[in-house]
Amino acid sequence: MRLDHRVRVAFRHVAQSARSLPPSEARLPRLAWFNIKRALRIPTRSDRQFLVEEFGRQLAHGRIGSAVHVTVAGRHDGAGSQALARMSAICIARKYGLTYVHTPFLLMQHNEGPPDQWATTWERMLNLGHGERSVAECPLPRVEIDEFMADRRWWSTACLLSIGHMSRVVDRMPDAYLDVIPQLRRKYDLGGPSKARSDVVEVCAHLRRGGDVSVENPETAYRYVANDPTAKAICAAQSVLKEIGLTSRVRLFSQGDEADFTSLRDLGFELCLNTPAIPTFRAFVEADILIMTKSSFSYAAAILNGGVKLYDRFARAPMSKWIVRESDGSFDCGQLRARCQEARR
């Protein structure tokens, strides 16, 4: 076996060993492995999620100075993920006294029109850059997370930290969003007036399907939610609303053919299939009850939503007042009853 091949194999074993350790035990080995790769000029992109978490730890210990500015850049995934990345950066910047610098949406997946116009449409609807410093106006030296975490001199230097997301930092304390939700909602409201309230309770449910999520695709199957758990959650919510004398309208948003949702249609739910993303997102934000799915799209909408959220477990952690659903769709109906009665008052 050639020496260079043996070295590569040894490095892979070291990396796999470090990543397989429990998070509390893996931290120091992962940092050591990251520094070794830096010294040997081995690419460190695969370490960035870990480095974001380490950045959060150092923030919590007060080791990152307030001169640091942060921006979210380099993302080309879906609108929900990109919105959530910027919301999390605003959240962390406010919590720890950093300065958020806004990089506009540039490229997105799942374009519903020309790519540049699609990104601009989301920019204008969310208005996350309103009242913030623009990246074009920031003269500070730009630093990627790899370099920032490798050189502690940046931690107390006026610089612009370019980061992909901070959701993993907020996941340790999701209620940190509460301090910035009023500000995020004011930005959103600049894009158009809110829907007028009515006596009918608007229930919106999200099922992520289509090319994004398929039970046959091993890379996305973990996000797949079957019809039955969703039906169980919706029916339980309807029962609570009926019990306290409220009338509801249920809309189910998803992708695919109507034949895939026959059991839900037969229960009387209004199917909104393959609906454009913008009106879908607006419906989620304005819903009185939002039944979420394993998706950054509905999570970002839930942050802006002022109603009741029924959360489906996935990578992003729920806020304390969100009602957590079990894998079979069940949840604590008493919590929903209390939230609805509180909203009526």
Image (cartoon, rainbow, N blue to C red):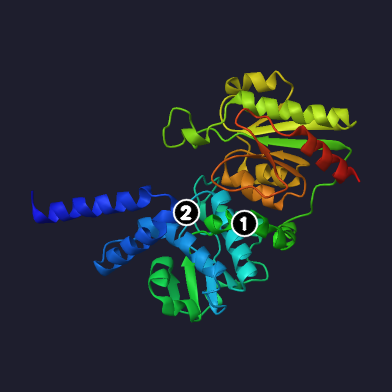
- Tag count in the figure? 2
Q: Amino acid at mark 2?
A: His
Point out which mark residue 76 bears. Answer: 2
Q: Position of residue 19 (x, y in %)?
A: 36, 51
- Distance Cα–Cα, label 1 vs label 2: 26 Å
Judge whether residue 117 can be spotted in this image.
Answer: no
Report the side of 61 relative to 275 (left or right): left
Q: Position of residue 150 (x, y in %)?
A: 38, 71
Q: Amino acid at mark 1?
A: Met
Of the two numbered discs 1 and 2 on the same chain, state the one appearing first in sequence.
Answer: 2
Q: Position of residue 135 (x, y in %)?
A: 54, 72
Q: Secondary structure at mark 2?
A: loop
Quadrant in which residue 229 is drawn: top right
| Residue 331 vs residue 154, the one in the foreground | 331
| Residue 11 vs residue 145, the one in the foreground | 11
Point out which mark residue 173 bears. Answer: 1
Report the side of 7 relative to 46 (left or right): left
Which residue occupies 38% across, 61% down? Answer: 28
Quadrant in which residue 239 is drawn: top right
